[in-house]
Image (tube, grey):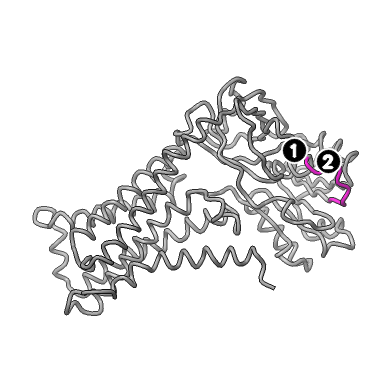
Amino acid sequence: MITRHFLGSAFWIGIYFILATMPIFAMLIGPTPPGRGFWRELSIGFGFAGLSMMGLQFFLTGRFRNVTSPYGIDVVYHFHRNIALIAFLFILFHPFFLIVSSPKTLMLLNPLSSPWWMMAGAIGLLSFAVVILTSLYRIKLGLTYERWRVIHGYVSVIAVALSLSHIVGVGYYMQGHLKHYLWIALVAAWFSVLIYIRILKPLIMLRHPYIIEDVVKERGKSWTLTLRPEGHKGINFKPGQFAWLTIEKSPFSIREHPFSFSSSAMDTGKIQMTIKELGDFTAKIGEIPPGDQAYIDGPYGTFTIDHYLEPGYVFIVGGIGITPIMSMLRTLADRRDKRPLLLIYSSKTWEDTTFREEIDELKNRLNLQVVYVIEKPSEECNGEAGMVTADIIARYLSDDRMEREYFICGPEPMQKAVKEALVKLGLPLERVQSESFNFV
């Protein structure tokens, strides 16, 4: 039986394919330039497809819930990153096949004699290269997340605009009203999304600010921020979801970062996010004074127990990956849910195991079994030593293991190892849910 989830996924994949290939099919409609040869036509097709895919990138990062809900926003962002490489390759094929078919085309790259539209195309190509290289090698280039976002955002718009100027200047395959209307519609759609993301959405957020009520230090170099809505009811979220957080700046700022909710979804009067000191922004998270203003863009994500009504859950987490799981546990406790729960919690040291005191208290309110796996164990810790392995997981799984839903959260190497362990134990991957915040 085809589920609604599958239909939603297939629908958006189909829409993407149609929009990405529409300029190619438009080449075949109406008058076409005669005698241009196969390789030249192929180069045009690659160029149109690559530019169309690059324009669609604005939609993929627009955080439209209807688009992201069938897959999870982390999957959409990973698709955005990988499809950009394919689109850039298509764009590179455009000049390559032109030069192969006619080496004289190289003469058009002379900035002293080439037409303006040729230079627009060349600079547009270089701009796309800057976007790709700074994304692939951001850390090696020493770019902070905020500086990278500036480059990525503005240079992408410049690259698309220059590429469109190149198409208009060349003039081929632009004859006829239908082709004109098609390109006008595509360009209007791309830039309408930009206007929504950069102007309309921040204006909406500006009317729904939050106040940071408290900043509390947790174990493992982590801090819990408590935010209360100011002048509005706040938002409803599902346990395990996340949102983009902007602190002190206006919602027009690029200084926003994704963090999971750690509070109970049943407590609508406040929001809590627990953040570990890791990057440039989070390194100073503990210095934020209560009373600062903040803005929330969310909730997002499909990593939530509310989508899976199984008779029990297994949570396997590492480090700060406990954050969304805490939201789930707190929510289940507030709902007085007595379904069996297993938490396998991996941490480097016992001292750095975030929330361990509250987790032990939650065992009194939940049907919860907790297994700590400590990489560098001390005498006072209770549990397993080393890393999470298939043998450790197998020791604590119950007889109804095939009926439970599994949630994995933590560093990517840990998630990969745990998934391999679950497959080794014969558990189907369709029962395994995970989420990654490595969007860049």
Q: Which residue is mark 2?
A: 333
Q: Position of residue 254 (x, y in %)?
A: 45, 36
In the image, is 105 to the left or to the right of 432? left
Residue 339 visible in rendering: yes
Residue 353 visible in rendering: no
Q: Which residues are magenta?
A: 331-341
Instruction: Assess whether mark 2 and mark 1 are in contact (beta carbons under 8 angstroms).
Output: yes
Residue 43, image quadrant: bottom left
Q: Position of residue 253 (x, y in %)?
A: 45, 33
What residue is drawn where x is 66% and y is 71%?
2
Q: Looking at this rendering, what residue extends furthest in the left direction?
A: 113
What residue is drawn where x is 30% and y is 60%?
183
- Height in image: 199 above or below 56? above
Residue 138 sits inside the magenta stretch: no
Q: Position of residue 385 (x, y in %)?
A: 80, 48
What residue is drawn where x is 43% and y is 55%?
57
- Height in image: 93 above or below 273? below
| Residue type at numbered disc 1 | Ser
| Residue type at numbered disc 2 | Ala
Q: Which mark is residue 264?
A: 1
In the image, is 48 to the left or to the right of 112? right
